[in-house]
Structure formats: structure tokens, C-alpha cells
Image (cartoon, rainbow, N blue to C red):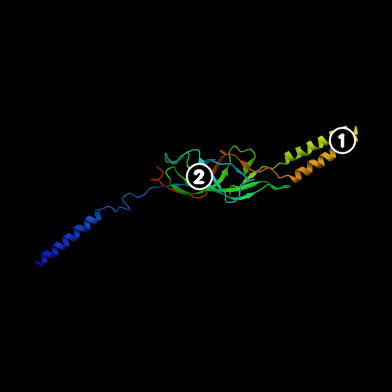
Amino acid sequence: MRRVVVFLFLFSFVALAQQAANTPDPENANPRASITLPAGTQIPLKLAQGISTKSAKVGDAVYAETVFPITISDKIVIPAGTYVQGRISDIKRPGRVKGRAEFLMHFTTMIYHNGYTVMLPGAVENIPGADQQKVKNEEGTIQQEGSRGKDAETVGKAAGTGAGVGAIAGRDLKGAGIGGAAGAAAGLAYVLLSRGPDVNLPVGTSVQIVLQRPLTLDETRIR
């Protein structure tokens, strides 16, 4: 009788062990698939608000959205219209004698329309279509072009106006010369007392960022 009980116990134990082995683990039943975008992937954006070095401050938020879908293996992994957020991390106003306006911003977060949020290691690589700004280094610092041509034009106009006034007042070339020198001096003083141009990026400005590190996405969350 004791042998029968022992046999039944062992048979039940083996049956339970087999059942447990054949039962799928709920945590591993549907393992999450991931997709990784390699470092260097370019993502085109457009600004959702304007940015100016005249009013912006370090720490200000920057808002943008993607303008073209990013695909991997014929699958859209970043749809157009995905929200992107960043921060201004450095800013420099233009100087009165020298020094160009510039600022640095980093894009740090990407938000899908379903609320899926990922950290985005993105730096500005280019600002397509911008005539007066350029990206000057690998960090993505945006710099305003200088104003030497406009400064020279300002001095020249002031000198010409002064020469005209001097010629009328003195009615000779000497008066024109004196007036021209005075006008040039006034124009130069105006240039020295004025700041150079600020960086101004209006709403809708195209900004192309590049991934500084690989970006891993949850495939089940981006569908």
C-alpha cells in the first residue's frame, strides 16, 4: 500500500512538472521587439516657435516636429508630425565692436501621438534654407553672419550725406570734404555703439538634427 502511495505521489509530481514546463511564461510570452536607429541618423524638423538671441535665455524650451517619416526595413519608425522637444543650453548676444550672435540647443525628447516618449540624443547638424545663419561646429552651435558689409554701407551713406550738407553750406569742395569727414565719423560712431545682428529663426524654420548615439525604440509602441 505504501508503495502505491509513493508511486502516485511521484506520478503526480512528474505530471505537474511537465505541465509547468509546457505553460508559457506570461512575461516572455510576447517579448517586446525593439528597433535601433544608428548614430548618425538624420531627422528633419521644423520649429514650432520662433527663436531669437535677443529674447531667448539659457534653459528655454524649444519645440519642433518631424517633417518627413524615418523608415527602417520598409517600416515607418518615426512618423512625420512626431513632437520633438529640446532646450537652449548656451546663448551669446552680438557684440558692439566684435563678436557674432550665436546659440546652442539640444533636442532631448521625442513624443509620439499615442504618448510614447523616448529620450532623443539629437544635435543640430544643419539649418537648410537659412541665409544669414550657419552651424559652426559639431555641437550644433548656430551662428549669425557678420555685418561688415552693412557697417561699411552705413559709414559710406553717412559720409555721403555729410559731404552733401557740407558742400551746400560751404559752397565749395572744402566744405564737402569737411562734411564728408564729419559724416563718416558719425557713421562710424553709430556702428561702434550698435550691436551686430541677432540670430532670428522664425516659426517653421527647417532644422536638421543628427543622432549622436543609437536610439532604441519599442516596436510595439510605435505602431
- Residue extending furthest bottom? 2
Q: Around disc 1, counting alpha carbons within 10 Å, would you say few (fewer than 14), some (14 to 19), or many (20 or more)?
A: many
Residue 50, compared with residue 11, is above or below; it is above
Q: Which mark is residue 3?
A: none
Q: In this rendering, which labeled residue sits more in front, label 1 or label 2?
A: 1
Q: Position of residue 137 (x, y in %)?
A: 61, 48
For the residue pair 13 and 99, the one nearer the viewer reads as 99
Secondary structure beneath label 2: strand
Q: Which residue: 62% across, 49% down?
A: 91
Q: Which residue is mark 2?
A: 84
Q: Which residue: 56% across, 45% down?
A: 124
Q: Which residue: 81% across, 37% down?
A: 159
Q: Position of residue 202 (x, y in %)?
A: 59, 39
Secondary structure beneath label 1: helix
Task: Classify residue 148 by image quadrant.
Answer: top right
**Left or right, residue 30 beside residue 95:** left
**Left or right, residue 72 beside residue 95:** left
Q: Which residue: 89% across, 36% down?
A: 175
- Image quadrant containing the N terminus: bottom left
For the residue pair 208 and 186, the one nearer the viewer reads as 186
Please indicate, yes or no, whether residue 64 appears anywhere in the rendered image.
yes
Q: Position of residue 106 (x, y in %)?
A: 55, 48
Give the CA separation, mark 1 to mark 2: 59 Å
Q: Which residue is mark 1?
A: 166
Please indicate, yes or no, whether residue 137 appears anywhere in the rendered image.
no
